[in-house]
Amino acid sequence: MISILEKIVKSKNKQNFIIKGGFLLSNMMSLNERTTQDIDCLIKGINFVKENILKIISDVLRYDFTDFIEYEIKEITEIKKRDKYNGFRVKILCKLEKLEEIVKIDLAIGDVITPSEIKYNFKNIFSNSSFEIQAYNLETILAEKIFIINNLNIQSTRIKDLYDIFLIYSLKEFEIDYNILKCACLNTFKKRNTVFNIDLILNLLNEINQLDIFKLLWNNYKQKYFYAQKIEFEILVESVIKLLEKLKSS
């Protein structure tokens, strides 16, 4: 996956891509243990239709910097989203001699970044090098996850976002700009036609902390991902509450 990012930043289309999602977060947290097969990007500056996406990804993959990997676009499908902006998922077959891997790139438009995207120094753990790429800032990442937490219920149970906020708060607590985070939350919620109310989210978290269904979901998550095995659900929720209380008082 890193080789695809390197192709993006060396291509003529690099300004059209802003990386986000779990792959970025793992790199920001200097973790290589949270494995993901997806790259998530916000796309800007192009007409967001299938034909253009196919062309821009094909152009990126054609850029050769002797990584000895063969790339083949296997599929491009539309991703249906709840808001008015849909996205595309591109599946790419990566081959190195007898090794094969499918990498998925999820592309979207319409998100708001507060105050703006950053130039992020992406660390390549395999070559002990780095390269600069456009990316979401920490506060916008948190704002999007707080929005997801705001919508948690029995039908919507994305437990991993609780873990992600716990992770950011645990490792980057003193790097968070709470004034920017507050603006990012207001902008993210407004973009999605939702009122940002910290007290309501805090009440929701206190309710979630008492629900067995969420504790069961967390236990299932821990069994699947070894890096989460030592973290109790109550500690997870408490970290999110602490972050929101700091945000409220800022």
Image (cartoon, rainbow, N blue to C red):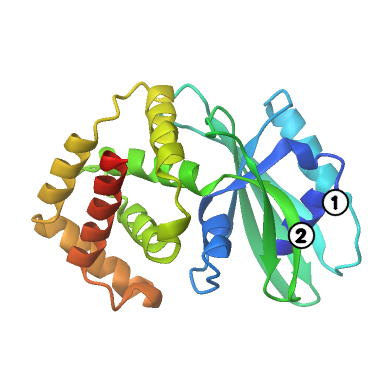
Q: Secondary structure at mark 1?
A: helix
| Location of residue 193 in the rendering, given as x and y in whole percent from the top left corner | 36, 21
Residue denoted by label 1: 10
Image position of 39 with respect to 227: above or below? above
The answer to whether residue 11 is visible is: yes
Query: On the rendered image, what quadrant is the N terminus found in?
Result: bottom right
| Location of residue 69 in the rendering, given as x and y in whole percent from the top left corner | 82, 67
Residue 185 is drawn in which quadrant? top left
| Location of residue 66 in the rendering, given as x and y in whole percent from the top left corner | 91, 66
Q: Amino acid at mark 2?
A: Phe
| Tag of residue 221 | none
Residue 13 is drawn in which quadrant? top right
Residue at horizontal 85 percent and vertical 46 percent from the top: 11
Image position of 115 with respect to 161: above or below? above
What is the crowding at mark 1: few (fewer than 14 residues within 10 Å), some, or many (at least 20)? some
Q: Are marks 2 and 1 in contact (CB under 8 Å)?
A: no
Residue denoted by label 2: 131
Residue 222 is drawn in which quadrant? bottom left
Dot 2 or dot 1, earlier in sequence = 1
Q: Secondary structure at mark 2?
A: strand
In front of the other: 15 or 159: 15
Residue at horizontal 34 percent and vertical 60 percent from the top: 166
Q: Amino acid at mark 1?
A: Lys
Residue at horizontal 78 percent and vertical 57 percent from the top: 6
Residue at horizontal 69 percent and vertical 58 percent from the top: 121
In front of the other: 11 or 223: 11
Q: Nearer the viewer, mark 2 or mark 1?
A: 2
Query: On the rendered image, what quadrant is the C terminus found in?
Result: top left
Drawn side of residue 208 relative to residue 88, left or right: left
